Image: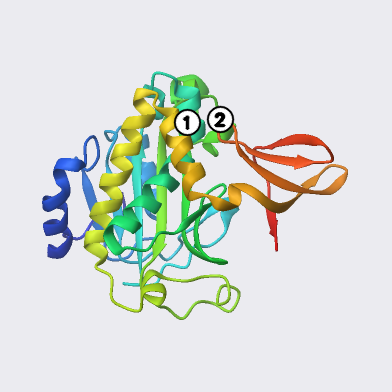
Amino acid sequence: MAQHPDPLPAEFTEAFERTRTRFGRLGGTVLFFSSIHSTNDVAAALASSGAPAGALVIADAQTAGRGRRGRTWFSPPGAGLYVSMVLEPRRSREPERALALLTLAAGVALSGAIEQATGLRPDIKWPNDLVVGPRKLAGILAEGIVDRAASGSAEGGAPDRSPATGVAAVVLGYGINVASAAYPAELADRATSLESELGRPVDRAVLCAETVASIAGRYDDLLAGRFDAILDAWHERAPSGRGARVQWQTPDGPRAGTTAGVDEMGALLVRAGGQTERLLAGEVTWLL
């Protein structure tokens, strides 16, 4: 690792110590950086070098943070929570399903953690966003680290594109907008923050500890095969998962339909033309 980590700030150390009994399998290793290109990249390097599952990478700022489909994640200093962790869903009783539901489980965990820490209850928007009304509050990015013995490669693509047996680990990253910031023009009308919504300061360290503890609980659900609990919680926290109008691209052009929940593997179900379509990947446009 080219850049050495910085000391974990005292407020994070204190918050973690108060919450550590709920961290379960997570947090055995914690690396903090004042500024780093991408927490996911650092966590991926850790995973590829054999770091144990549960390792955490936290940054005060990212210079090349990214979201789904290669988009940039705006990560200014002190304004957000930027965290990545190394997980091993292949150790689940049903690894293929655990891998498929990891992002949904993380969304449930983060929505619950934000509510617990701040009182604000964000909605989940398939597949990987937390929103307040029409504005995005947080995003999740899961990236697979492919088993070298299985593929001859150290890194893989999105978990939903690799069989669970070939994925040695998954880097789960998330960014939460905490403080108000001068968002780029293309984000100004689409992004929000906890402090903007609440009208008061939010303790990032307490929030960080709560997110780790909440993800630890849902990670245990995945490993133990408690998938129905995750899906039930997802539907409860994702009102747009049913009855919302969406559009997506097909080889024959755009199609539109109405959301009808998710299936047992986390695919979005959409009713269109009297049939139910199953959407796994690609771009979904949510229509007003």
Q: CA distance from mark 2 to mark 1?
A: 9 Å
In the image, is 162 to the left or to the right of 210?
right
Which residue in the protein does label 1 denote?
A: 99
Q: Amino acid at mark 2?
A: Met
In the image, is 257 to the left or to the right of 233?
right
Q: Is residue 221 visible?
A: yes
* Disc 2 versus disc 1: nearer the observer: 2
Q: For this rendering, which residue is in front, 28 or 3?
A: 28
Q: Residues within 10 Å of mark 2 (few under 14, many from 20)?
A: some
Q: Secondary structure at mark 1?
A: helix
Q: Are marks 2 and 1 in contact (CB under 8 Å)?
A: no
The image position of residue 135, as x and y in percent, is 54, 68
Residue at the image position 36 percent from the left and 49 percent from the top: 84
In the image, is 258 to the left or to the right of 41?
right
The image position of residue 115, as x and y in percent, is 34, 57
In the image, is 90 to the left or to the right of 190?
left
Which residue in the protein does label 2 denote?
A: 265
Q: Amino acid at mark 1?
A: Leu
The image position of residue 248, as x and y in percent, is 75, 49
Residue at the image position 28 percent from the left and 75 percent from the top: 201
The mark nearer the N terminus, 2 or 1, is 1
Residue at the image position 55 percent from the left and 77 percent from the top: 188
Up/down of 86 relative to 238, above or below: above
| Image colouring | rainbow
Q: For this rendering, which residue is in front, 29 or 271?
A: 271
Q: Secondary structure at mark 2?
A: loop
Residue at the image position 22 percent from the left and 60 percent from the top: 206
Up/down of 208 relative to 45, above or below: below
Q: Is residue 152 visible?
A: no
